[in-house]
Image (cartoon, grey):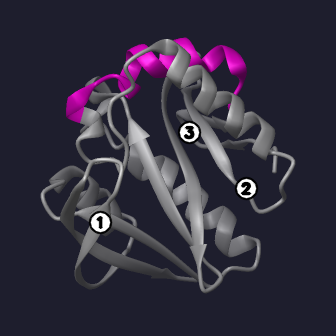
Amino acid sequence: MKIELETKRLLLRPWRLDDAEPFFHGWASDPEVTKYMTWNPHESVEETKGIVALWVEQYEKTERINFAIELKDTCELIGGIDVVGYLDGVPVIGYMLKRDKWGHGIMTEACMKLLDFLFTNGHDTVRIDAMVENIGSNKVIQKCGGIFIGTEEQDRPMKGDKVLVNRYVFKA
């Protein structure tokens, strides 16, 4: 689904093929950012180009909701937020943000906008998981009104490990 959403500071827009370079250099290759992801840091811009190309193709599917996050005042690409999947029909949100943008309320703003979009479009429950040690992400979820439902162990096959994640739900 190709749509745009706006907040005071942000444009949540469809990914474009030319986003691969800033995505790679901004955070996909940053081990500090990707340590909280299910995937490893990208080793080349070609790897990132492949991912972005896949996302662009997936816009043909109506259930695919995936946004690049851009600062409106500078047009800088700084992150991404999407519905990574559905569990029993419940959308699960995932997000990523350039490290130099952490702690500025940006992801809270983007997350609130996506939650509002999902609730407005018929979902009554949304879920977000965050690694226990990812303090910043847990704070974002709590600021957005997430209801803590428990901590569980989760496999990360691409990284070959298991991590503890806090699970949260949001109700319309």
Q: Mark 1 highlights which residue? A: 155
- Give residue 7's quadrant in the image: top right
Instruction: Give the image location of residue 118, x and y in percent.
Output: 66, 68
Asked where in the image residue 120 lies, by quadrant, the reply is bottom right
Kindly report the distance in space between the C-alpha atoms of the residues bearing marks 2 and 3: 24 Å
The numbered dot on residue 8 is 3
Q: For the residue labelled by badge 3, is the local secondary structure a helix, a strand or a loop? A: loop
Is 19 contained in the magenta span? yes
Q: Which residues are magenta?
A: 15-32
Residues 72 and 44: in front is 44
Q: Amino acid at mark 3?
A: Lys
Q: Earlier in the sequence, mark 3 or mark 1?
A: 3
The amino acid type of the residue labelled 1 equals: Asp
Image coordinates of residue 82 in percent, x first then y, are 58, 52
Q: CA distance from mark 1 to mark 2?
A: 23 Å
Is residue 74 visible to the viewer in this orientation of the structure? no
Residue drawn at (59%, 59%) of the image: 83
The label shown at residue 64 is 2
Label at residue 36: none
Quarter of the image for the C terminus: give it.
bottom right
